[in-house]
Image (cartoon, rainbow, N blue to C red):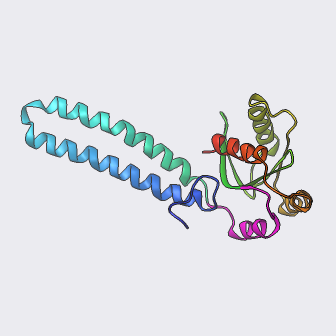
Amino acid sequence: MRLGAKKGEYGYISAMKVKTALITLAIFLCAISVYILGLYFFREQKTMVGIVTVLICIPASMALVRFIMFMRFKEGDPHLKDMIDERRGEVPVFYDSIITTSDKSYPVNAFIAASGNLIGCTLYEGIDVKKLEEHIKEIFRLNKYKDLNIKVFTDSNKFFERLDALSSHYEKASDTDRNILHLVGRISL
C-alpha cells in the first residue's frame, strides 16, 4: 500500500482510508483542544468557546463521513492488477474507482479507455451493472462523448478477452483516451 497513491492508481482506496482517518482524528483533536484551552483561558465566555468548538466539529464530521465512505470498500485484487498490467500494453488504465450515483456507490477495480471504448472490471458482488453503465453513459453524454462504447464486466475472463482485443492494435495513448479516464476520475469518489 502506498500512502501517496493518487486517484486512478492502484492502492488509492487504502491510501484514502489512512489519509481520511488521520484528517478526521486531527480535526476532532483540534476541536477538543480548542474547547479545553478555551475553557481554561476564557472562563467567562463559555458560550463562545462552545460555539467555536461546534464550528470546528462541522468539518470534522464531514471528514468522518468521507472516512466512512472509504471504509465501505476494499482495495482491488492485486492479482487482477498484475494481470491487467501484463496485458494492457500502452492502453491507459484507471484503478480503484468508486462511482457514486444518487442511489448507490459502485466500486470498480479498473477502467480501460481505448479507441472509443471504455471498459471496466468489477469483482464486487451485488453490482447492478446495467444501472452503473447507464449512469456512466449519461455522464459521458452530458460531456459530449456520444459515440463512446461503455461496458462493465463482472467476469474477469470476458474483461481480459476485450482488453486483449483492444490492446492488440493499440499503439499510443491518445488525448481522447486520457480525457475519458480523466472524466472517470472526476466522477469517482
Tell me if 26 is positioned left or right of 180 in this view: left
Where does the image place residue 159, in percent across and percent down from the top left? 85, 58
Pick whichever, 31 or 87, lies toward us.
Answer: 87
Q: On the rendered image, what quadrant is the N terminus found in?
A: bottom right
Identify the residue at horizontal 17%, vertical 29% (top origin): 47
- Where on the picture, by quarter, is residue 12? bottom right
Find the magenta span and give its range: 75-93
Identify the residue at horizontal 61%, vertical 59% (top origin): 74
Q: In the image, is residue 85 part of the stretch drawn in magenta?
A: yes
Where does the image place residue 142, in percent across and percent down from the top left? 75, 28
Tell me if 51 is positioned left or right of 67 in this view: left
- Where on the picture, by quarter, is residue 88? bottom right
- Where on the picture, by quarter, is residue 138? top right
Identify the residue at horizontal 40%, vertical 41% (top origin): 61
Q: On the rendered image, what quadrant is the C terminus found in?
A: top right
Pick whichever, 19 or 101, lies toward us.
Answer: 19
Where does the image place residue 6, in percent across and percent down from the top left? 57, 55
Q: In the image, is residue 126 part of the stretch drawn in magenta?
A: no
Pick whichever, 145 or 160, lies toward us.
Answer: 145
Tell me if 164 is positioned left or right of 4 in this view: right
Where does the image place residue 157, in percent across and percent down from the top left? 87, 64
Looking at the picture, does residue 177 appear above or below residue 2?
above
Image mark count: 0
